[in-house]
Amino acid sequence: MRVVAQQPEEIIDSLQPLRVEWQDEVARRVISQLETTPAKEKYAIADVKKILDDHFDDGLLICRLFLALSKDEFTAALRRALDGQSAGIKGYRRDPDKFLAALESLGLLTAMTQCVNRKPKWSDVLVERLRSGRGSAISGQKRGRGVEDFAEAVVKQVFGAAYSKRCAFTGARGDTAKCDFAIPSKANPQILVEAKGYAATGSKMTDVIGDIEKIIAAKRADTALLFFTDGLTWNQRKNDLRRIVAYQNRGGITRIYTSAMAKQFETDLRQLKSEYGL
């Protein structure tokens, strides 16, 4: 093969868009079932039962589409409505009435009625593209930022303005790592707070664990690390949560909190403030 010296311009000029067909066999089946689902002024739970009985997995996907929930959000909400029981076909077969009642409690019948009877506009297609694309990313960001803001409100109540937020702190041996809050400052933190709302995908979860590991590796051994989190989709990633709890059990994380533990979070911050003389 002849050796040549290529230029960036020739590669750029030869680039073409990667066009793919988004529909797979599941999508085609679901679309077919949606097209044959009768339009009604009001839906009953018997209509949902028929959708699930025709093809359970496809039917559950249709329910999720009506509710406009991600797979993780839908599964977590359904399991909660089922009191922790299986949200799959085994749970449905074990107690169909309870399963259907759980779906109804999520507002499925209302969502179906509103969706089917809504008068379509040309802009609906573009709005849906915006929601599923940019809107999905924004929703994830807002969920995460909501947890950060909640935690920051408590931090501010205890320490006033004596903290750095969303910064890279300096720890042991001059190592640095990013964290959400460094108290009293990023230059010499004695308390670190990492706040993560979890209602995202598995890849995001990997990022959360990676961030925690970097903080543990960089911080001084005597620096307290508090992890503040929330989100029902942790129920879908229990092994990842166990990994984080294991860090707490080994002393890498001082304590883990959720929004329901806000009072304990504030109490512990005040105690650490006193112990560190801040």
Image (cartoon, rainbow, N blue to C red):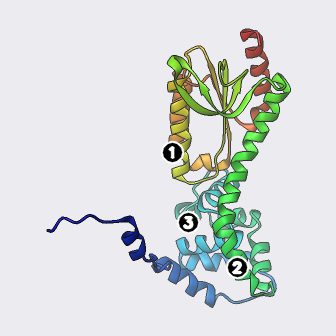
Specify the farthest residue to the left: 1
List x then y, in percent, for residue 14.
39, 76
How many numbered markers are drawn? 3
Q: On screen, 251 above or below 246? A: above
Separation (CA) of disc 1 from disc 2: 32 Å
Separation (CA) of disc 2 from disc 3: 39 Å
Rendered residue at 53%/65% (across/down)? 89
Rendered residue at 59%/70% (across/down)? 60
Can you tell which quarter of the image residue 138 is in? bottom right
Q: Which residue is mark 2?
A: 126
Q: Which residue is mark 1?
A: 206
Q: Which-is-in-front pick, marks 2 and 3?
A: 2
Q: Which-is-in-front pick, marks 3 and 1?
A: 1
Q: Which residue is mark 3?
A: 93
Q: Amino acid at mark 2?
A: Leu
- Under circle 1, the secondary element is helix
Can you tell which quarter of the image residue 48 is in? bottom right
Quarter of the image with the C terminus in it: top right
Using the image as rendered, state which of residue 79 and residue 272 is in the foreground: 272
For disc 1, the neighbor class at 10 Å (few under 14, some 14 to 19, many from 20) is few
Q: Amino acid at mark 1?
A: Thr
Separation (CA) of disc 3 from disc 1: 34 Å
Rendered residue at 52%/41% (across/down)? 240
For disc 3, the neighbor class at 10 Å (few under 14, some 14 to 19, many from 20) is few
Q: Earlier in the sequence, mark 3 or mark 1?
A: 3
Q: On screen, 68 above or below 180? A: below
